[in-house]
Amino acid sequence: MESLAPEDGWFSEIDKNLALSLRQKGEMLFHEKSDFQDVKIFDSHEYGRVLTLDDCVMLTERDEHVYHEMITHPAALTHPNPKRVLVIGGGDGGTVREMARHPEVEEIVLVEIDSVVIEQCRKWLPQTACGLDHEKVNLIVGDGIEYVKNGEPESFDIIIVDSTDPLGPSEGLFTESFYRKAHSMLAANGILMVQSESPRIRVSIFQEIYSFFDKIFGQNNVHCMMIHVPTYMPGTWSLAFCSKGGLDPREGLNTERGQRFVKNNNLDYYNLDMHRAAFALPNYVQKLLGRIEA
């Protein structure tokens, strides 16, 4: 077994009954408690640079493309003509980086509450933060909950909630009232994409989120996506695709536009087969969501 260098150590994300550990390379690159959360950036041996908030892994350089490509491209390639996009959270820049690839999109409003995340990702994580300075992006440092609360009806084609777990500053992003207001901000055929936790841990939160979506959008317009992110404990993760106008991400996928998009962009994860496969749910998830009998 390889021995650790004197300056190396281990970072561990610890949940009630689980832990995820990454071998750290050298000293911490950045560590500061902002007004909202504990922000750390360090280099790891296996996954490159890592961003954690309150000791939860938000992204690593090696696998961030899974989450960022899948929370953006399925919505953008299902909507017939997405022009205005709102992203709540996502101060690392990865989500807006991916959404800006779509030529149909004209404006992306990004609302991030924590300026420390923005500043330090620009410094240490340019792989994702490059998206923050794209000409399509209107970056607002502020409270996404308040932004949505005061938002104009039918003003966005796609809304993406790229949040941390429902703790601290993100807790208010996981409420029925927030999702109802987001629904009102969607234009006709609008799509809401939400980071919807793991069906393997925090199961009650996962089920509650989808119960809100079912009530607001109607169960037939709510689609759960499964993705695998190795550094998101426990690896199995979900994204919610909610359609205001009844667009189906499986039947409504614009195949011609999607094939052209994949060909013209050097993507690491997303393709049309992965798009379709993400909506195929294992039985245990369908039971949790009440799609089949338990």
Image: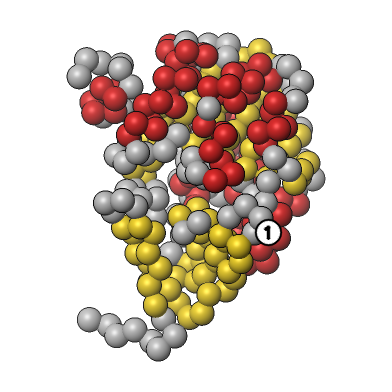
Q: As rendered, which of 9 and 167 lies closer to the eye?
A: 167
Q: Quadrant of residue 85?
A: top right
Q: Relative to 78, is 155 on the left or the right?
A: right
**Residue 210 on image: x %, y %:** 42, 23
Report the colour scheme. secondary structure
Q: Residues within 10 Å of mark 1 (few under 14, many from 20)?
A: some
Residue linked to disc 1: 116
Compared to residue 71, the image places residue 245 above or below, namely: above
Left or right position of 134 against 92: right
Residue 3: where, in percent of width, then height? Answer: 29, 85
Kindly tell me whether residue 261 is visible in this rendering. Answer: yes
Q: Residue 6 at what x, y percent from top left?
A: 40, 89
Q: Residue at position x 62%, y 15% from top?
A: 189
State the residue at coordinates (34%, 84%). Answer: 4
Q: Is residue 25 left or right of residue 38?
A: left
Image: 221 above or below 130: above
Q: Amino acid at mark 1?
A: Val
Residue at horizontal 66%, vertical 12%? 188
**Residue 149, position as x, y percentages in the image:** 70, 26
Q: Which residue: 34% across, 31% down?
A: 204
The quarter of the picture where the C terminus appears is top left
